[in-house]
Each structure stands twice: as structure tokens, then as C-alpha cells.
Image (tube, helix red, strand yellow):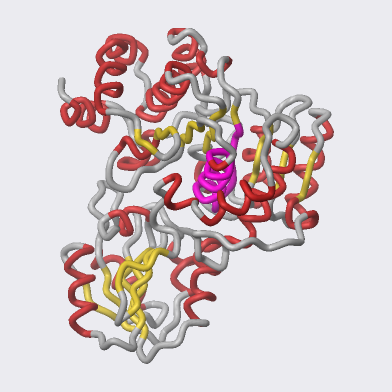
Amino acid sequence: MNYQETINWMFVQLPMYQQQGASAYRNDLTNTILLAKHLGNPEQKIKAIHVAGTNGKGSTSSMIASVLQEAGYKVGLYTSPHLKDFRERVKINGIEISENFVVDFISRNKSFFEDNKLSFFEMTVGLAFDYFVKQEIDVAVIEVGMGGRLDSTNIITPLVSVITNIGLDHTQFLGNTLVAIAGEKAGIIKSNIPVVVGEYTKETKEVFLAKANDCLSDIYFACDLVTNDYPSGLLGDYQIHNKKTVVQTIQVLRKYFEITENHLEKGLINVVKNTGLLGRWQQVHSNPKVICDAAHNSHGLKSVLNQIQNEVFDSLFFILGFVNDKDLDEILPLFPKKAKYFFCKPNVLRGLNAEILKQKALEFGLIGNTYNSVSEAYQQALNDSIDSDFIYIGGSTFVVAEIV
């Protein structure tokens, strides 16, 4: 198989949460452990930073990787989901894994995958770890896919575990309270391995403290410890919390790596250039100003919507699409009634029908029309707007993926 055939096989033949949702979720590490053994346990041969959390995982992982790159290290970065191409998930110093490596890896291990019915995510984790070992990286930043305790990435023993924050998302898998979700995220805390927590509430803090105590792990609450703010290439207001998490994590990592204050500052500024991260308060057009952002749950959207209210504009336009497992009763009330809405369906199997979204939005006083695609909605918004207006594109990572 060539690269495209290989990717198609991975996407279609095996469960993939990005496309299918619940049916792709594995609440068990048995297959991942089996795969790791089959590959010679590459996870034991890399130094790693493990990053979990409801929101900000991708931004935080990318900033940590960028700082380590500025310090001169060869840095692997594993994130999910991808926006345009599968290879975005696995990078070294910002350069995506080669098509040839992906093809060869799948070809060599295809019968094993089929015999053991491995999921898309399990395969991809194995691919990343194998690639990082073969490329002889200095360190890897590994983003959790979902949750933590039972996530396929949780076979590593990292130098530091990082938990950005806790919000209500993926409640059908992780629990429907902040305490339950915090318990799943805290599952990445390992014995005698330090943990950095970004944001917390009174109830989630107790969960983290209890787990850290059980594991005899030092715990650092970044929002209490970091007072300096640093400029960053990521411009969303919500990044202030992620930056504090990064700064505290780098402080812990100085035990293992030579990282100066200059490396930290340059890493934060150059994060987009160094890692290729997209879709975080990203401006894609001027006059009118158009911002797209991958925020897709109430915790993330509250920050984004607050930032929009600080913008200066005449009229406000929202291009919105969601996947079909989002709690719209929790999300839609956050949006302002005084705005024009353009409803669309992201081009994935899990995409929510635009007409259903329109009718649901109407219940909350959000009025607009439906469009056949994200691009059609975007073009109509540009046609209807003037230079002094503001257009926001979001609701789902997959809506943003069709624009950036």
C-alpha cells in the first residue's frame, strides 16, 4: 500500500474516535501493553513528559516541546487529533513523521494489528513510540488522547506528569462530575514522579493531592506558584493558564535538562514556528477580522467567548458546527443572542446535522441559517460582513480543520 492507501486502511478498518466516537473507545490497556511488547517496549527507551487535561493539552504540550527545542534538544511531540493530515500527530522538532515510515510501520505490523484487533489510537501510539526510539530523540512530549488512567499513552513512566485542568467533557467515558473526571486524569500520576497541575477547583485539588500522596509524588500547582507572565505566539486569553503550567513544568525539567530563561522565553514566542500548532485563536483573515479556535466544550468556550466580547466590532458572526456527542444544552446558552449564526456540519462521520443544530440553537435564541459545508458558511459570512465586523469559526476541532 502507498501512504494514502495505508491511511485509508487505518481510518476505515479500525475504530477511530475522531470519526466514530464511542464505538472506538477502549477502556483497557491490555492491547497497548501487548503492542508495546511486540515492538520491543519502545516506551521504556524514551524520556517523556506526559500531558493530560480537559483543555489546553495541545497548547501546553507544544509550548513545552518548543522550549526544549530552543534549548537544543531533539524533541518528539505526540498529539491528537490531527487537523489536516495524520502525520501532524507525530513530529520531531516540528517536522512531521515521513510517509514512508508510516507505510513501513503498518506494513510490517499489519497482521499483528488485525490478529489482535487493535484500535486506531493504539496503533498510532505504538507508531509514535517506535518512531521516537528509531530517530534517537532526546525527549518526547506525549499528549493523552482522552482521560488518562486508561489512555493508551499511559504505559510510559515520564520525568513529569502534567494535568492542565478539569472540565466536563467526554462524560460518557470519564464520569459526569469534576471529581470523577479528575480521578481519571490523575491516573497518569506515577510512583515518585513529580506532577504539575495547572488549574484546579477545591474538589479536584483534593483528588490530585490524594493521588500524589498515594504515589509519594511531589505536586506543584502552577497557578499558585507562577506569578510571571510571558508573551507567547499563542494569542488566546486562556493561554495565560497554559503558560503558567509550562513554566512550572520547565522548572521541574531543569533537573534533567539545561534550560535557560532565554530558552523559555524564545520557546513560548516561537511555539507556532517550532511545532506547527494550528487552530488556537488563529487569525485567518483581516477586514473583517476572522478568528478560528478549536475550543469545543463549555470550559474552553467560556474563555473564548469572553475574549470575543473584548474585541471591537460592528456586527458579530458565528460559524458553528459540532460533533453529535456534545451537550448542546450546556454549550449553546454560552453564546450571545445578538449575533448572526451560520450553522454547518463538520465533514466527519460524527458531525452533527446542521438542521438539528439550527433547531436546537433556536431554543436558546440563536438565529441563523444552515449551510452545506463549513467553507460555504464561511464564504457567506464574508459576503454578508463589512470590514469592521468580527467572524468567529469554531465549535469543533473539525470545523477549524476545514478552514486553516
Q: Residue at x 39, y 43 (%)?
A: 81
* Residue 274 horizontal/vertical position (percent): 45, 46
Compared to 327, does 367 lie above or below?
Answer: below
Q: Residue 54 colored magenta?
A: yes
How many numbered circles does the render carry? Answer: 0
Question: If the image is split into quadrants, where does the N terminus sit?
Answer: top left
Is 106 situated left or right of 227 in this image? left
Is 194 situated left or right of 32 in this image? right
Residue range of the region highlighted in magenta in the rendering: 49-69
Is 245 situated left or right of 350 in this image? right
Q: Residue furthest bottom?
A: 314
Front residue of 150/138: it is: 138
Compared to 391, does 61 lie above or below?
Answer: above
Q: Residue 71 colored magenta?
A: no
Question: If the image is split into quadrants, where does the C terminus sit?
Answer: bottom left
Q: Main secondary structure of the magenta part?
A: helix
Q: Residue at x 24, y 21 (%)?
A: 103
Front residue of 149/135: it is: 135
Quadrant of the rendered image containing residue 374:
bottom left
* Residue 109 horizontal/vertical position (percent): 31, 12
Compared to 67, does 272 lie above or below?
Answer: below
* Residue 79 horizontal/vertical position (percent): 45, 39
